[in-house]
Amino acid sequence: MIRENMKLAIRSLKSNRMRSFLTMLGIIIGISSVIAIMTVGNSLKAESGEELSEFGSRDIDVYSYAESDSVPQLPFTEEVVRGMVSRFGERIETYYVQDYVGMGTVYNRNKKNDQVSVQGISKGYFAGNNVEMVSGSVFTKSAYKMGSNVAIIADKLAESHFGSVEKAMGSQLEVDVNNVYTTYTIVGVYKQKESGGLLSGGAQNSTNLFIPLKAAQAENHITTYYEIMVVAAENEDPTVLETELKDYLTKQMNIGEGQEINVSSLQSALEQVNRILSAITVAISLIA
């Protein structure tokens, strides 16, 4: 029976060679397409995972939000932050506050001007973002407390403006942000990470210039902050911690109608990206 069926199939293939060839070609192309699509999809998921890990997959963004101008936006107080750290203990590796001052220009005589993004930071930023220092050190406790006009710049800027990292240390650097000129003393130089890839948006033409948080707040004429970045401990699930942080802060800050504590982690973002990529991969595979 099997032998007769095989003979019948072979005769059918021989009698309809063109149709048989096109059928096999279609099968080969279809299977190859599915394999290629699955490979690309898995590669994209792996690449996005690696890049998010570099950015800080354990980072949790905590933000106080008000739905309209008529509803007061509640700032984070030192008491609330201390209570959060005490409540979650070792589940939190560190936390920090970041305040953006603006894009600034460092003018070079007879050279191309350098662009810097002036960022005010609190203690915990460098550890939370795995910043590698090339020379000098992070800000002192006194600099954070007083809001001193000191800065930590990238090695790329140090070499471009001063000629070397060694010459940059202890030097004065004048930065123009929206026609407001501020002079900083350089106390440290960090290693600029190479950018580029799926999530980074390509190469950057500017570098970050870090100053103490209070110095940035003075330039922005503010004394409060509405956003905290929390870094989960290495053995902690960020998606679990973010839910508990939201519940705790909502109660402690007496969040009312029209107010909200928004909490999101890069881990959650990665999971969402993977779900979208998986859905796209499956849909295109079905079409193929």
Image (cartoon, rainbow, N blue to C red):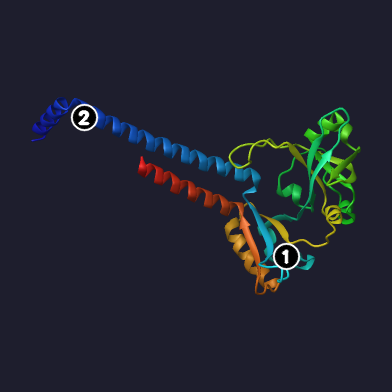
- Amino acid type at mark 2: Arg
Q: Please report the residue visible at 62 percent of the width from the left and 57 percent of the height from the top.
A: 264
Q: Is residue 271 above or below residue 241?
A: above
Q: What is the number of callouts on the image?
A: 2
Residue 21 is situated, as x and y percent measured from the top left of the image, at: 24, 27
Left or right of residue 207: residue 202: left
Nearest the viewer among 185 and 90 is 185
Image-quadrant location for residue 156: top right
Residue marked by disc 1: 86
- Amino acid type at mark 1: Ser
Left or right of residue 12: residue 21: right
Mark closer to the observer (2, 1): 2
Q: Is residue 228 above or below residue 288?
A: below
Residue 220 is situated, as x and y percent measured from the top left of the image, at: 83, 55
Q: In this view, does 48 lie above or below 228?
A: above
Left or right of residue 186: residue 116: left
| Quadrant including the C terminus | top left
Residue 271 is situated, as x and y percent measured from the top left of the image, at: 53, 51
Image-quadrant location for residue 78: bottom right
Nearest the viewer among 200 and 124 is 200
Image-quadrant location for residue 250: bottom right
Dot 2 surroundings within 10 Å: few (below 14), some, or many (20 or more)?
few
Q: How far apart are marks 2 and 1 (CA)?
A: 74 Å
Secondary element under disc 1, as helix, strand or loop, is: helix
Compare marks 2 and 1 and give the one earlier in the sequence: 2
Residue 259 is situated, as x and y percent measured from the top left of the image, at: 67, 70
Residue marked by disc 2: 19
